[in-house]
Amino acid sequence: MNIAITPKKTEGLERLLEVSVPVEEVREREDRAAKRYASQVRLPGFRPGKAPAAMVRKKFADAIRQEAIESAVQDAFKEVLEREKVELATQPHVHELKFSDGQPLTFELHLEVRPSIELPRTVGFRVARTPRLVTDDHVREQIDSMREQKAAWAPVDERGQPGDMVTVQLATADESGTTGDGSEYRIVLGGGQAIPGIEELIMDTPTGSTVERAVKWPEDFPDEAQRGTTKQVKITVKDVKRKSLPALDDAFAREVGDFDSLAALNKTVREDLQKDAEREADAQVRQKLVDEVIGANPFEVPPSWVTQLMQAYAEAYQIPEGEKERFEREFRPMAERQVRRDLVVDTIAKREKLEATEADIDDRIAEMASKRGVDPGQVYASLQKAGRIKELERSITEDKVFSWLKEKNTIEQG
């Protein structure tokens, strides 16, 4: 295709090209489109495909021209990619499209290209591996959490206090100052489920009683319109339940798992926490190694990839529309780092031939099946149905890349 390409921006990953398509190229496409319309359309007084070409061109002039322009732009785009030898990071954008009779078709093509990453330095780094020390307090906190899960709630004939679970009927006055029946809520006092003023009102109200008074909303309330406002609130406390933790003894250990004694439970909890600490230390080593590689090998990342990742996380976290701008502003550095990390892993995996093979995937699935005591085919079918084979492949590749990085660099044990 005989087009003219004028570069307007050639540095970095964002490229801007001005493309000019000769008027003859567009006319040729208009002729083809007109012939197709003439062979297919039905006009009054003529059999299908027998209407005069001039009449067809006049009646469908806008559609014919639009089809010709779209065809010319698509073919020109293909020609640009072939001539410029670029690998796109995302779909291109067409701007400033202009076409008038007797003039060439012109437009600006905005491209974002994939970065060319070399990573000349990936070895010779020193990073520290420092597992978190597991203390008696950590073990105690974990067991206390297990006791909380096994706690029993028993009714008490007292006013509620922090830690109690209360069932209340709560009504807030409307704009006219009227409080209706409201709705029933179950609230754990002190858990941040209600604003402080309402919790104070609940704790001042005896079980079975109804109290109504003005409550001030906090200045940091999420809804700006309600910050610092005072409203009439009516509370009926229906019941109060207090939590009773199970005794910390051998019977509790047997209840939470296959443990002969409290000592056995403590031992297992400590071992599990230590394994978590080791995994956390390994994850930190991976992060430090990637940071070292990124720091020694600066490169640009496609802005569209960062934006796509931020949008995916905003959707996963169900960020409200009104908060997306703030979320993306705060999350952008993390998203950019994640894109850099993935590019580092992909580059090393390709260069060092560390990508997961089918044999690697089969071995990992066999390992998973062995741990679950099921057939490998069953595990594979389950992963395939859930669309997680690619995820598994990625995980294996990352493991191989980080094993390679750890072999090539110095990991100092803290």
Image: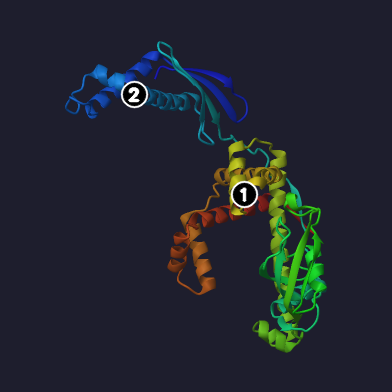
User: The C terminus is located in which quarter?
Assistant: bottom right
Q: Amino acid at mark 1?
A: Ala
Above or below, 4 against 351 in this view is above
Find residue 222 and name its label.
none
Give percent across and percent down for residue 36.
26, 26
Find residue 314 and name its label.
1
Above or below, 109 against 322 in this view is above
Q: Amino acid at mark 2?
A: Ile
Above or below, 92 against 314 in this view is above
Frontmost residue, 218 versus 111: 218
Q: Secondary structure at mark 1?
A: helix
Q: Which residue is mark 2?
A: 64
User: Which label sits in the foreground, 1 or 2?
Assistant: 2
Give percent across and percent down for residue 255.
67, 85
Give percent across and percent down for residue 16.
56, 24
Near mark 1 (Cα within 10 A), the count class, few <14, some 14-19 or many ≥20, is: some
Q: Please report the residue visible at 53 percent of the width from the left and 67 percent of the height from the top.
A: 368
Above or below, 84 against 23 in this view is below
Give percent across and percent down for residue 114.
56, 35
Dot 1 or dot 2, earlier in sequence: 2
Near mark 2 (Cα within 10 A), the count class, few <14, some 14-19 or many ≥20, is: many
Image-based side of 288 in relation to 301, left or right: right
Q: Is residue 247 visible?
A: yes
Q: Secondary structure at mark 2?
A: helix
Q: Is residue 270 visible?
A: no
Number of residue marks: 2
Image-based side of 371 in relation to 226, left or right: left
In space, the residues marked 1 and 2 are separated at their CA atoms by: 42 Å
Q: Please report the residue visible at 29 percent of the width from the left and 19 percent of the height from the top.
A: 57
Quarter of the figure with residue 56? top left
User: The N terminus is located in which quarter?
Assistant: top left
